[in-house]
Amino acid sequence: MSDKEKKTAASEEKEEKAAKKEKKAKAADSGKSKKEKEKKSIFKRIAAWFKDLKKEFKKVVWPTKRTVFNNTLVVLCVVIVGSVVIGLLDLGFLKLMEFLMGLSK
């Protein structure tokens, strides 16, 4: 790089840093004014919260009855199969312990 290119690059870096500092200063100033503006009464904030809640509920994609029914069946089947597997393992370990205890007599 030539000296001119180095000087140009250095000056561009300084300008970028200065621009970043200005943005940070503006953000800090605007943040203070927002805080002052946002000092609403508790009742207005509660009302705004419920309005936002209502908007969010409208965005929700609720499942159909068929989907809920299918998911419920899947959950019930998994619970039943899991219970049977755990019951069989318990029974197997019980018989194993009885057999081992019988060997010691």
Image (spheres, rainbow, N blue to C red):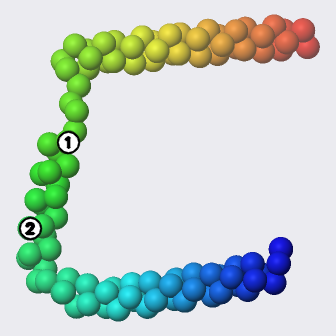
Q: Position of residue 63 (x, y in %)?
A: 23, 25
Q: Which is nearer the eye, 23 or 57?
A: 23
Callout 2–callout 1 Cβ contact below 8 Å:
no
Q: Is residue 72 visible?
A: yes
Residue type of the residue flagged with mark 2? Ala
Query: Dot 2 corresponds to which residue?
Result: 47
According to the picture, the residue beneath numbered tag 1 turns out to be 59
Q: Which mark is residue 79?
A: none
For this rendering, which residue is in front, 15 or 28? 15
Q: What residue type is labelled 1?
A: Lys
Q: Is residue 35 visible?
A: no
Residue sitting at x 18%, y 87%: 37
- Which mark's residue is nearer the viewer, 2 or 1? 1
Position in image of residue 27 (x %, y %): 39, 84
Q: Name the quarter where the C terminus is drawn.
A: top right
Q: In which quarter of the image is the N terminus?
A: bottom right
Query: Could you classify mark 2 by the number of other residues whose Cα lies within 10 Å: few (under 14), some (14-19), or many (20 or more)?
Result: few
Where residue 36 appears, as percent x and y from the top left, is 22, 91
Q: Where is residue 52, by image quadrant?
A: bottom left
- Give the distance between the C-alpha atoms of the residues marked 2 and 1, in whole angstroms: 19 Å
How packed mark 1 is, by other alpha carbons closer than 10 Å (few <14, some 14-19, many 20 or more), is few
Q: Which residue is drawn at 44% across and 84% down?
A: 23
Q: Determine whether, in the image, residue 98 is placed left or right of residue 13.
A: right
Which callout, 2 or 1, points at the residue further toward the start of the chain?
Answer: 2
Above or below, 56 relative to 77: below
